[in-house]
Image (cartoon, helix red, strand yellow):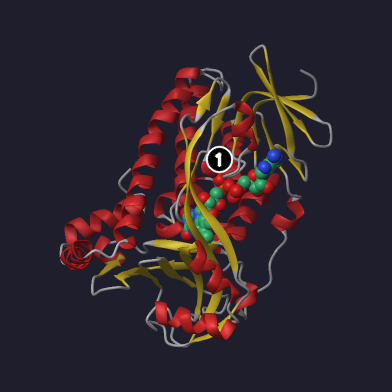
Amino acid sequence: MSGMNVDILVVGGGMTGSAMALGLARQGWSVALVEGAPVGGAIADFSPATAVADFEPRVSAISVASQRLLENLGVWETITARRHCAYQRMAVWDGEGTGRIEFDAAELHAPALGTIVENRSIVRALMLAVQDSGMTLFDGAKVSGWQEQGGQRGVQLDDGRQLSADLVIAADGGNSRMRQWVGLPTREWDYEQQAIVCTVRTAQPHQHTAWQSFSLTGPLAFLPLLNETGDEHFCSIVWSQDTGEARRLMALEDDGFIRELEQAIERQLGPVEKISKRFSFPLRQRHAKDYVRPGFALIGDAAHTIHPLAGQGANLGYGDVRVLLDELGKARRAGLRPDDELMLARYQRRRKGENLAMMAAMEGFKQLFARDELPLRWLRNSGMRWLNGLAPIKNRIAAEAMGLQR
Ligand SMILES: Cc1cc2nc3c(=O)[nH]c(=O)nc-3n(C[C@H](O)[C@H](O)[C@H](O)COP(=O)(O)OP(=O)(O)OC[C@H]3O[C@@H](n4cnc5c(N)ncnc54)[C@H](O)[C@@H]3O)c2cc1C
């Protein structure tokens, strides 16, 4: 195969791919990262936020486990040097009934349950470190084809360049072309829901709390944001609704949308004073039946996409990165090749069960709140009240969501 050759090629420089590539370079592998978008946009600094429009609408609730990975990669300091919000409490309630459950970091003897960060802030910190690491970065170039020849795997870029590697890791997102070219099938279905995201300013401070209400048509989250002056009145909204209802909400003028938003969150934070432009994303559950083929591995959304109701998508991707880095680190120390089949099989085994369990839990949760039959409503309300009073079980659930049980 012609063109540049490296040990490991990572395709896709989003939140998972750039973390993966960085970790591999730190382990001493020769690594190349290909990202379709020009990196200049990702590393550009962003100005302080004084208004709702200054925040990026896409944010992630980074778990403590993901935070540790980003700390180990040496980028957490860069991320937290910019605006971010560690949240200490989480309130979840049934918008159709009386059930309510509250989680508190203090009960877990933890400084926070997680941290809300704009996605661009994470990618920026990772891309700055990628540039410093000296690895080869092809940005503004998309992979447009895949080939395999005599134990070598290669890709073609849309500008005609060719690259080959012993191992190719695909982190090219939910619609992964790499997954399709390599022929890894998925189980998938449409949730028939869309997530509406935007930023709001509320009359009352968010108190470093993530607020989430469940209605029959879908969950609504107010995720706390902080600007550079520590103003506690900004929240990122993720409102998942059945497609017809989401379209109706998207078509409303701002005033009408705000009225419905305030009603749906039961004015927990008082009136919504300002709102940014709204965006909507169709929601689809997707899970690759296999994550690996000889010389090939999937990570992040390329392997699985889940409902954003518990904000776990990026955290599952970071779980993949953590385990694949662990396996490749051991392989390197043992003098094995990066495409060692047993090692890749171990990666798949270690991740698949955990990802499937999280996906099943999200599905169960979604179904439980999507039905209005009396027994289910009773189960929801009494179950939430019962759980709220049972500290050990409740804290175990919180620790699981924080990634502390793995
Ligand atoms: C509304 C919403 C809210 C969410 N909230 C949360 C949350 O609170 N917490 C959480 O953990 N997760 C959340 N998620 C999920 C999270 O955003 C995703 O899991 C995460 O962004 C996936 O990252 P990724 O790097 O795997 O994929 P992506 O972010 O999709 O990155 C893929 C990258 O690959 C590049 N690429 C694609 N094709 C090619 C190609 N052919 N050649 C080269 N490059 C290519 C793209 O340019 C992109 O940079 C949410 C998702 C949604 C929809």
Residue reaching furthest to the top? 150
Q: Position of residue 271 (x, y in %)?
A: 46, 88
Q: Where is residue 161 in the image (x, y as percent from the top left)?
A: 82, 31
Nearest the camera: 345 or 229?
Answer: 345
The answer to whether residue 81 shows anywhere in this view is yes
Residue 136, percent across and down?
73, 36
Name the foreground residue: 139 vs 371: 371
Give the answer, above or below, for where 329 lies relative to 221: above
Left or right of 241? Residue 39 is right
Residue plotted at (58% across, 27% down): 183
- Residue 204: name its quadrant: bottom left
Quarter in which the N terminus is drawn: top right
Q: Which residue is drawn at 35% across and 66% down?
A: 216
Residue at horizontal 61 percent and vertical 27 percent from the top: 182
Image position of 117 with respect to 199: above or below: above
The extreme right residue here reads 160
Residue beneath the point at 33% across and 55% down: 367
Of 354 and 43, the residue lying toward us: 354
| 157 displayed left or right of 390 | right
In this rendering, would 88 be left or right of 180?
left
Residue beneath label 1, please?
A: 302
Q: Is mark 1 within 8 Å of ligand 1?
A: yes
Task: Name the residue type under label 1.
Answer: Ala
Q: Which image quarter is the C terminus in?
A: top left
- Disc 1 residue crowd, few under 14, some 14–19, many 20+, Cα 10 Å: many
Label 1 secondary element: helix
Quadrant of the rendered structure where residue 197 is?
bottom right
How many dots with numbers? 1
> Where 348 sits versus 341, above or below?
below
